[in-house]
Amino acid sequence: MNLSLYLLTVLIWGTTWIALKLQLGEVAIALSIAYRFGLAALLLFVVLLFSGRLQAVDRRGQWICLAQGLCLFCLNFICFYTASQWIPSGLIAVVFSTSTLWNALNARLFFGQRIARNVLTGAALGLTGLACLFWPELVGHPASQETLLGLGLALLGTLCFSAGNMLSTLQQKAGLKPLTTNAWGMLYGAVLLSLYCLVSGVPLHFEWTTRYVGSLLYLVIPGSVIAFTAYLTLVGRMGAERAAYCTVLFPVVALNISAYAEGYQWTLPALAGLALVMAGNVLVFRKPRAVPGTAAGKLA
């Protein structure tokens, strides 16, 4: 089950860049994200209400849902989209993939979870692999004040994503399932984004074209309802640090699709990077060896 959820998340998030690209046009980015999560929240509430699976959320849970909506369905997207104006997407992918490390550190800080050595080593291999994959894009980008600002925003977006993971873990420990908390979180995120658009003077507009509506529906259903639910379920089942390795793998999926659809050429450094990413994946999910003399060792 975990493997199916993991592969589903990687494959969906590895293809959402196509839909995001099709969203660019007359509608402001922040407003498009508000549409995305507003519709996703509506769909989740309808499904949960009709199936009788909507859980009651107390005041404390609602505050955490609000914080999760702010971190996971609002601020991180604003940070990443704004950063993309100043730094290449490859660099954003490398920064975002550090969420594996941030999740491990935050899980240790907030929940006292031991940081597994194989997870840290695997994450380091994955980051090195992504750097090799995007090396031409990275070295070809001039260093400037805008580059530092873009890096700072990408890092802030990654930290927001990691904080959202921790909040989801907290909710699941309290017995709330990701479907319910995602519905509330996406609703809060959509409301906050709408307020941001209103305050910043973004014109309310919708593009009634097949391209825009089709890409929006893909982002709403597979990209948000399915992928976020699958991912946050993994966070609760296998730990935030292991689940976050998805962020290392989905740029690899995106590059493979780009090779087919846009003529991306695989180079020797890129292939070496791919090998490092896959090796990191094996390390992250390898079960730690039982140490002789410990309780786990005796059970083994």
Image (cartoon, rainbow, N blue to C red):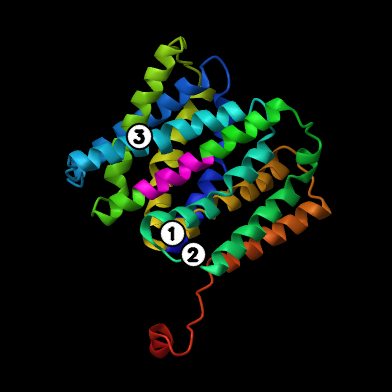
- Looking at the rendered structure, the kind of residue marked 1 is Arg
Q: Residues within 10 Å of mark 1 (few under 14, many from 20)?
A: few
- Sequence-first disc among 3 and 1: 1
Determine whether, in the image, residue 106 is placed left or right of residue 86. left
* SS type, badge 1: helix
By secondary structure, the bulk of the magenta-drawn segment is best described as helix
- Sequence-first disc among 2 and 3: 2
* SS type, badge 2: loop
Q: Residues within 10 Å of mark 3 (few under 14, many from 20)?
A: many
Q: Position of residue 132 (x, y in %)?
A: 75, 51
Q: Residue at x 59, y 67 (%)?
A: 282
- Sequence-first disc among 2 and 1: 1
Residue position marked by numbered label 3 in the rendering: 186
Alpha carbon separation for disc pair 2 and 1: 7 Å
Residue position marked by numbered label 1 in the rendering: 108
Q: Position of residue 82 (x, y in %)?
A: 58, 26
Q: Which region is colored magenta?
A: 158-167
Alpha carbon separation for disc pair 2 and 3: 30 Å
- Quadrant of the image containing the N terminus: bottom left
Residue position marked by numbered label 2 in the rendering: 115
Q: Residues within 10 Å of mark 2 (few under 14, many from 20)?
A: some
Which is in the foreground here, disc 3 or disc 1? Answer: 1
Q: Are marks 2 and 1 in contact (CB under 8 Å)?
A: yes
- Looking at the rendered structure, the kind of residue marked 3 is Met
Q: How many marks?
A: 3
Examine the rendered structure and indicate whether residue 291 appears above or below residue 80: below
Front residue of 101 and 208: 101
* SS type, badge 3: helix
Q: Position of residue 143 (x, y in %)?
A: 77, 32
